[in-house]
Amino acid sequence: MISRLQQRLRRHPGAARLVSVAGLLLIAAAATLGVRSGSVGNVGWVLFLAVGVTAALVAGSGVSWPLPAIWTVAALLSAVRDDVGSATFVVVAVAFGLAGLAAAVGYDLSPRARRQRARRDH
């Protein structure tokens, strides 16, 4: 089902970009809502995050680093506004965002590193 949706979106690049941007905006909204509520139990930000990540991955360009990057930036910007629900939530959200960013950059660069090693071996 997801591959069929991806094929349809590839036929309409404008729609794919729109869904991808909407996914990134949902991730930013999830970070903002999570920081403001300061609660892991609040289901609203978790739902926004799940839908945003799914939309961005289905319609995205094949790179994953913008997802944790937008989460981290939105969490930090929300924390600066002084309406923080819990400082602990902000610290954990930023820590997970930075760890996710490092993992995503490594994942996105791993095919390039494999190609360079294969060229070097030949």
Image (cartoon, helix red, strand yellow):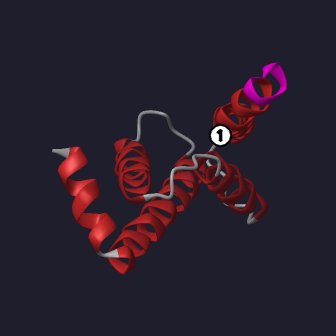
Looking at the image, residue 63 lies above or below residue 119: below
Number of residue marks: 1
Side (left or right) of 61 relative to 95:
left
Residue 96 shows in the view: no
Residue drawn at (74%, 66%) of the image: 81
Query: In this view, which residue lies farthest toward the bottom?
Result: 14
Secondary element at image label 1: helix
Residue 33 shows in the view: yes
The image position of residue 78, as x and y in percent, is 68, 60
Looking at the image, residue 111 lies above or below residue 60: above
Looking at the image, residue 3 lies above or below residue 104: below
Which quadrant, please, contains the C terminus? Answer: top right
Q: Nearer the viewer, residue 7 or 78?
A: 7
Dot 1, crowdedness within 10 Å: few (<14), some or many (≥20)? some
Majority secondary structure of magenta residues: helix
Residue drawn at (65%, 47%) of the image: 65
Displayed quadrant of residue 111: top right
Side (left or right) of 86 relative to 15:
right
Residue drawn at (37%, 49%) of the image: 44
Taking the magenta stretch, the answer to whether it contains residue 59 is: no
Displayed quadrant of residue 6: bottom left
First to last magenta residue range: 118-122
Query: In this view, which residue lies farthest toward the front?
Result: 122
The image position of residue 119, as x and y in percent, is 78, 30
Which quadrant, please, contains the N terminus? Answer: top left
The image position of residue 114, as x and y in percent, is 70, 27
**Mark 1 residue type:** Asp
Q: Nearer the viewer, residue 122 or 46?
A: 122
Residue drawn at (44%, 56%) of the image: 56
Displayed quadrant of residue 8: bottom left
Residue bearing mark 1 = 108
